Image (cartoon, grey):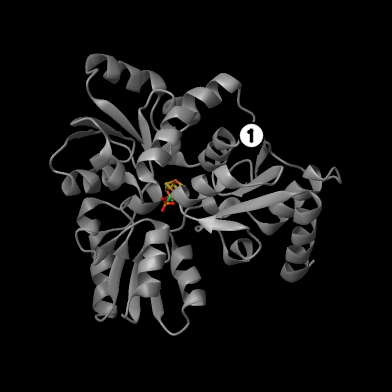
Amino acid sequence: MTVRELQDNILKLKKETNTAILAHCYQAREITEIADFIGDSYKLSVDAKGVDNENILFCGVHFMAETAKILSPQKHVYLANRNAGCPMAEQMEPEMISALRAAEPDRKVIAYINTTAALKTVCDVCVTSSSALKIVKAIDSEKLLFIPDCNLGDYVKKNCPEKDIKLLNGGCPTHARLTVKEVKAAKAEHPGALFLVHPECTPDVVALADYVGSTTGIMDYAKKSDAKEFIIGTETSIAEHLQYDCPEKKFYPVTKDIVCHNMKLTTLPDIYNSLLAIGGKGGESFEIEMDDQLIADARKCIDEMIRLGG
Ligand code: 13P
Ligand code: SF4
């Protein structure tokens, strides 16, 4: 089957099975083309809550599908590729965070949404990269522990000096690869370009940015800007999507190495096979199964995120 034939079959099966496809913007172009909802982690959480379809097929990583299930427990939620996980989401154990809470009960725990459902149950509120600063400023506590991403945490801390924010040593291995040397080389090659960066990058890289924001934030900024050239400091797919969307502008990834191999595990055949299985026509699907108590306990901090971040 050609890519176009595969996409046409997916669109047909999607309708037949009453399935909504949600795709994170780090997915490849051929996947975002057949998705119903595309966005950053925050937008997709809100979209998942409002979806009418009986089934949700998530093209992203495991914690995102888990979040969709927590927000829409009555729906069947599937992850298109069962092996797509986010390494950062697995970095901290709930027991360790519970022990830190017990030692300092007046310090509220803020969890980046890139965490397992089990970890969310011991946190007060979730944040995404686009909502972190707003939520940290809005939360009714001066003392905070921000987990697991110390780079996003550092960005929030610098922009919210009025709060006492503790960080732990976690983060995104994909964004952490980006170096100051690489950014300076890209700037030297494209002297007129603005540098747009994701706050999961290290503080020394973020310090060189003209704009810091989530994946959707970066895309919106580039589209609205009068500038014509941009160096993009996040997963390479964002520069690719922007180049399609704004052919009159120029987008350069800092390096072509900033690839999240977990996000890139999902393929069109995975989506096709998942939809075949959902429709009972063969194929293979991976449904997110969670018990009701875990859903209820993890949901509190996601609801709080939507309440404070909305
Ligand atoms: P956002 O979707 O919040 O931009 O985060 C990027 C990311 O790394 C998701 O895993
Ligand atoms: Fe996780 Fe980083 Fe990949 Fe996002 S880009 S899914 S945070 S490893």
Q: Quadrant of residue 288?
A: top right
Percent across and percent down for residue 285 are: 73, 41
Most foreground residue, 173 or 48: 48
Left or right, 101 with respect to 289, comes to left
- Which three-letter amino acid code belongs to the residue tagged 1? Ile
Q: Is residue 262 visible?
A: no
Q: Vertical placement of 4 versus 14: above or below?
A: below
Residue placed furthest toward the left: 162
Residue placed furthest toward the right: 281
Percent across and percent down for residue 204 are: 20, 55
- Residue appearing at x 70%, y 52% in the figure: 271
Element on which disc 1 rests: loop
Most foreground residue, 297 or 183: 297
Percent across and percent down for residue 38 are: 54, 58
Q: Is residue 206 visible?
A: yes
Left or right, 180 with respect to 235, comes to left
- Quadrant showing the N terminus: bottom right
- Residue appearing at x 55%, y 36% in the figure: 71
